[in-house]
Image (spheres, rainbow, N blue to C red):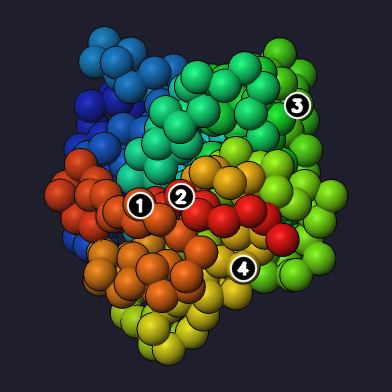
């Protein structure tokens, strides 16, 4: 790719061909988002883009090469969209996926009729679910729990940014979702516990963007991918008030196994699984059937 002044159209054409040759799944979208980030404009503005100065063209060329090497797009732009938010992301934190927006929407539906609900997000990562809930239900008390020392710095950064923007502040806590003493002061009073836990089975084949850049603590869940969930179910049952709700994201292949695991735990009613917009099994929900202990 040229580093002298070039038209936006020429730069995009070169980038799309480079990314497609590297096997990037959405070469045109990624090429456009990278150029928009470099220029500080929207994708729509690229439609009328003329000449790009050489310095910016060189920066763009470097980013395209990094993307071709399968560095996640969001690490290169520094942000990831999630519902109505733009979250900061980068090395050390799991990049939130669009399908998780459905789980956040389910939480908001469950608390819609409550003036001051309490929501706990276990394994918060970037803070996507917790911050979306606080943004869309200002009356909620939201606690975000994360155990990874690198990831929780991103949680804190995003939480501080959203509080500065006027959202209800989210409480960020360093902790393990399987810890029997976690948040014991909230035993039996939480309205919703939600989690996008590590659920990838050990040895599963994943894209390079995931295996080389997402933190291992956010990915791997043991031989069947459900080890962390097994440990977390007791925490959720303890925290929830009678009739409170639990929502857990899972892998496509766990649409039967995870609901079965929740039912076998013995503390849950109304166990159901839900599909994403691509009609793939995506998250399991259940209602607490006994008081928190």
- Return the mark for residue 234: 4
- Upstream in the sequence, badge 1 or badge 2? 1
Distance from Cα at disc 2 to Cα at disc 4: 13 Å
* Residue 117: image location, x then y, percent: 63, 28
Seen in the image, is 278 located left or right of residue 178? left
Residue placed at 24% from the left, 57% from the top?
Answer: 281
Q: Is residue 281 visible?
A: yes
Q: Are marks 3 and 1 in contact (CB under 8 Å)?
A: no
Mark positioned earlier in the residue sequence (2 or 4): 4
| Front-most of residues 241 and 37 | 241
State the image coordinates of residue 78 (x, y, percent, origin top left).
56, 40
- The local crowd at label 1, few if under 14, some if 14 to 19, many if 20 or more residues have their Cα within 10 Å, is few
For mark 1, what is the residue? 270
Question: Which structural element holds mark 3?
Answer: loop
Residue at mark 3 to residue at mark 2: CA–CA distance: 27 Å
Q: Earlier in the sequence, mark 3 or mark 4?
A: 3
Which mark's residue is nearer the viewer, 1 or 4?
A: 1
Task: For the residues labelled 1 and 4, say whether their Cβ atoms are less than 8 Å apart.
Answer: no
Check if mark 3's residue and mark 4's residue have beta carbons within 8 Å.
Answer: no
Mark earlier in primary sequence (1, 4): 4
What crowding class fits label 3: few (fewer than 14 Cα within 10 Å), some (14-19), or many (20 or more)?
Answer: many
Determine whether, in the image, residue 25 is placed left or right of residue 201: left
**Residue 94 % position (x, y):** 54, 56
Q: For label 2, count other residues whose C-alpha is less than 10 Å away and answer few (under 14), some (14-19) or many (20+).
A: many
Q: Which residue is mark 3?
A: 169
The residue most toward the right is 185
Give residue 287's mark. Answer: 2
Cα–Cα span, label 1 and label 4: 17 Å
């Amino acid at each position: 790719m040229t580093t002298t002044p070039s038209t936006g159209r020429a730069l995009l054409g070169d980038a799309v061909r480079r990314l497609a040759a590297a096997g990037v799944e959405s070469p045109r979208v990624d090429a456009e988002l990278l150029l928009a980030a470099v220029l500080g404009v929207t994708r729509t503005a690229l439609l009328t883009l003329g000449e790009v100065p050489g310095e910016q063209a060189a920066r763009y060329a470097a980013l395209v090469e990094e993307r071709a090497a399968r560095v996640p797009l969001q690490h290169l732009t520094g942000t990831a969209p999630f519902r109505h938010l733009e979250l900061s992301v980068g090395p050390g934190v799991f990049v939130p996926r669009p399908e998780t927006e459905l789980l956040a929407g389910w939480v908001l539906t469950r608390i819609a009729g409550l003036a001051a609900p309490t929501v706990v997000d276990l394994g918060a990562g970037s803070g996507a679910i917790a911050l979306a809930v606080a943004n869309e239900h200002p009356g909620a008390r939201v606690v975000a729990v994360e155990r990874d020392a690198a990831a929780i710095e991103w949680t804190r950064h995003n939480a501080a940014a959203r509080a500065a923007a006027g959202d209800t502040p989210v409480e960020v806590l360093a902790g393990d979702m399987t810890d029997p003493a976690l948040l014991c002061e909230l035993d039996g009073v939480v309205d919703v516990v939600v989690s996008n836990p590590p659920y990838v089975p050990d040895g599963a084949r994943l894209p390079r963007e995931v295996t080389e850049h997402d933190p291992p603590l956010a990915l791997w869940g043991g031989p069947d991918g459900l080890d962390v969930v097994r440990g977390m179910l007791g925490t959720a049952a303890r925290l929830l008030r009678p009739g409170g709700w639990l929502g857990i994201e899972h892998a496509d292949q766990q649409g039967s196994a995870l609901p079965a695991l929740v039912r076998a735990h013995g503390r849950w009613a109304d166990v159901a699984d839900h599909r994403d917009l691509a009609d793939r099994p995506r998250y399991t929900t259940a209602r607490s059937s006994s008081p928190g202990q």
